[in-house]
Image (spheres, rainbow, N blue to C red):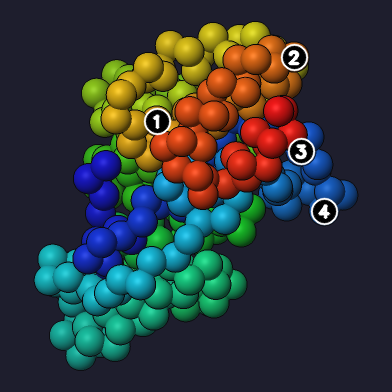
Amino acid sequence: MARRGTRNLESNPPVAGRRVGGDDRDRGRPAGGADEWQDEGPVRDEASRAVARGAARPRRTSTQVPGDVRAAVAEAAGPARADRTAARLEDAAGAYRRERYQDARRIVAPLAEQLPGTAAVRELHGLTLYRMGKWRDAIRELEAFAQLTGSVEQLPVVADCYRALGQTAEVQRCWDELRREGASVEAITEARIVLAGAAADRGDVARGIAILREGPVDVRKPQEHHLRLWYALAALYERAGEVPRARELFARLAHADPGFGDVAERLDALS
């Protein structure tokens, strides 16, 4: 995806951090409330690692703020504070990239209060909150980012937040908007995984499988979003008891990327 904000802070950035996935594992909601719900399945960051969930691998890339983002920060913060503010944004992006989300939030939250009209700041704040499982707060920030930019690129993340909150109608709304706005294939695929996961959450695994099968499953040269789709579909096949199909798809995934999440372990278990 052509991304702004967080991804603009890196010369070779990872896909924005999502919990997006169709993982088939049970999801617990602790007594602390829905905003503390966590998905422990490996798809969690495969939909953000490879946009992701499991464990995203940080990349050793620069987090220097590029000229256009620096100019936006300077305009919002004023010349006297521009350099310091840009440096703080770089620090927050670096902490986010290293998966130090508490540190990233500590740095970027004050910037979001000080510069509410700066899209890069609101996006990074929203993605950090998302990684921390603060679903409602993440929605607020990422919807602000969308209003500031007119971009739908983070709608799959917003949809996944609504999924975590059990708001299926909002997941569907995000899906419909992405399709209506002609989003990228990657964004559509990420949202498709979320939509299928929401169906599986309701116990309709067959519907989740059907949603995923309508996506780009049969490709000769899979990209990262294809691999995430394969994983989600294989997991739902396994959940539905369709073991041969699950095994075949996990095998394809392992051939394409042996280090993808826990695919090797799952394939071994099915074999």
Of the numbered discs 3 and 4, the one sitting upstream in the chain is 3
Q: SS at mark 4? A: loop
**Gap between marks 1 and 3 measured at Cα:** 24 Å
Q: Which mark is residue 27?
A: 3
Relative to 269, is 213 on the left or the right? left
Q: Is residue 104 left or right of residue 59?
A: right
Q: Earlier in the sequence, mark 3 or mark 2?
A: 3
The tag earlier along the polypeptide, 2 or 1, is 1
Q: Nearer the viewer, residue 82 or 5?
A: 5
Q: Which residue is mark 1?
A: 226
Q: Which residue was labeled with disc 2?
A: 241
Kind of residue at disc 3: Arg
Q: Earlier in the sequence, mark 2 or mark 4?
A: 4
x then y, percent, for residue 80: 20, 90
User: Circle 3 — which element?
Assistant: loop
| Contact? badges 3 and 4 (CB < 8 Å) | no
